[in-house]
Image (cartoon, grey):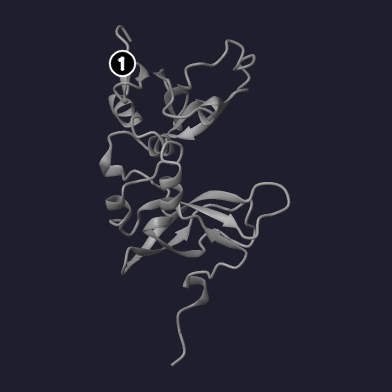
Amino acid sequence: MSDATPASTRPIVPAEWGLLDAEAQHEAFPDTFPIPTVGERQALRAGDMVKLVFVLDPPPASGPNAERMWVEVRSTLPDSAYEGWLTNRPKVITSLEPSAVVAFEARHVAGIALRKEDVTFDVKLRAVVSTRVREVPGPPGWAGFDTPLDATDSGWSITAGDEAEDFFGDGDGTGTEAMALGELVQRFPALVEVFQAGVGEWVYRPDHRRYVRLKNT
């Protein structure tokens, strides 16, 4: 009997790319490559958004050889396996297109986006984040809330906490980038408490592994 499933809905068979084993990467670098727990990665359901790392194989002679992209879980399979739709437009792996169906396993999941029912804040709103946050290990050192500028702005600003006075240029946006709250808490779970509060100025206390709100803010 022939397979009547439309090609567009069948999982793509990797050719010049593969998926990073996030579980193995985390075991090798636990402090710099955090991932969701085994229980979370094995309990995905249709509609969940997961982050996978797509890797070119063989790697190119120059330039990036991988990119992190979001996949929406379409169906669950036996043995902690899944299928999902790619939601990003790749920049590095040009043979992939948005909506491509990707087969993956729990070990490949590098991140899981928060479900709307899990939090009281809008995970799609964006924060102004210091680019230095990507360069330092551990959670950002400071978070502060101010009146949102528009409907897409959360009002939150996030910094590493050790930026030089001239790091942000002349107020032209140099040294900052916009990041969704959902992506931030996926990378730094301790920020959930901060965003849930919705107000104030917070600093991260490594000894307590949590943020503390400054008084009179």
Amino acid on which disc 1 is placed: Arg
Q: Which residue corresponds to mark 1?
A: 213
Q: Quadrant of the C terminus?
A: top left
Which residue occupies the foreground of this view, 60 or 202?
60
Local secondary structure at mark 1? strand
Query: In the image, residue 211 lies at what x, y percent?
Result: 32, 22
Which residue occupies the foreground of this view, 206 or 210?
206
Q: In which quarter of the image is the N terminus?
A: bottom left
Q: Is residue 126 above or below residue 62?
A: above
Q: In this view, does 149 lie above or below 29?
A: above
Query: In the image, residue 4 lies at what x, y percent?
Result: 45, 84
Q: In this view, does 162 lie above or below 45?
A: above
**From this viewpoint, which residue is outermost toward the bottom?**
1
Query: In the image, residue 207 lies at what x, y percent?
Result: 32, 21
Which residue occupies the foreground of this view, 146 or 29?
29
In percent of the image, x 47 and y 90: which residue is there? 2
Q: Quadrant of residue 156?
A: top left
